[in-house]
Image (spheres, helix red, strand yellow):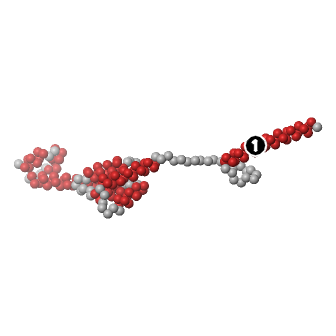
Amino acid sequence: MLLLWFQSTISAPMLRKFIGCTSSWLVWDKNHNYFHAHTNVKARQLRIELRPLTLEGCTISDFLMEIQNLVDSAIGDPITIREHVDIIIEGLPENYESSVSHINNRSEPLTIDEIETILLGLEARIDKFMKKPVVSVNVASTSTAYSGSSSVSPQANFMQESNTQQQSGNQSQFQNQNQNQNNAT
């Protein structure tokens, strides 16, 4: 009677796995072995998926949520809090190193919520400094050889060029006056 009940609850695609079972114990045992093997494979696959997770290209919230979703999926072989913390730490970039040191050097382990709070705070500070405007001043100057001046600031250089042009204009005006006087005599 129990055998018929088991067979009636098994879906059609799965029923072929239980052909030849003559007792309810055999159906139960095959069912247990089948799902136990699948659970172990799934747990291994989740652990493999957790290894390469990094913060690169996403926010702390998204990163931690992705890890949490995979950790919650590990049914047959649950991930310990210590392993969970290690997965988080391994995925953080270099600019989170101060927080990683703080998390690792605690005498009492932090909870996942405490770690999330620390990392969200650091992310906010990093974003704040990344968005700060950078002021840069570019000064371009040309050097021209002047007699008697070895190094001049661009403003002084401009003033010196203006004075030189004025003097040369005055000199040519003076020379023109002298030539006019010489031609008249």
Q: Residue furthest right?
A: 185
Q: Residue at the location (90% across, 38% down)?
A: 181
Q: Is residue 11 left or right of residue 113?
A: left
Furthest-left residue in this view: 1
Q: Residue shown at 29%/49% (left/top)?
A: 69
Q: Quadrant of the C terminus?
A: top right
The x and y percentages for residue 124 are 40, 49
Residue at 33% x, 52% y is 116
Which residue was labeled with disc 1?
Answer: 165
Q: Position of residue 142 (x, y in %)?
A: 67, 48
Name which residue lies at 32% across and 54% down.
114
> Helix or strand or loop: what does disc 1 sit on?
helix
What is the tally of numbered marks visible in this picture? 1
Hey, what amino acid is under mark 1? Gln
Q: Quadrant of residue 40?
A: bottom left
Q: Is residue 30 left or right of residue 156?
A: left
- Tell which of 7 and 159 is nearer to you: 159
Q: In the rendered view, tell whether residue 55 sits above or below residue 183.
A: below
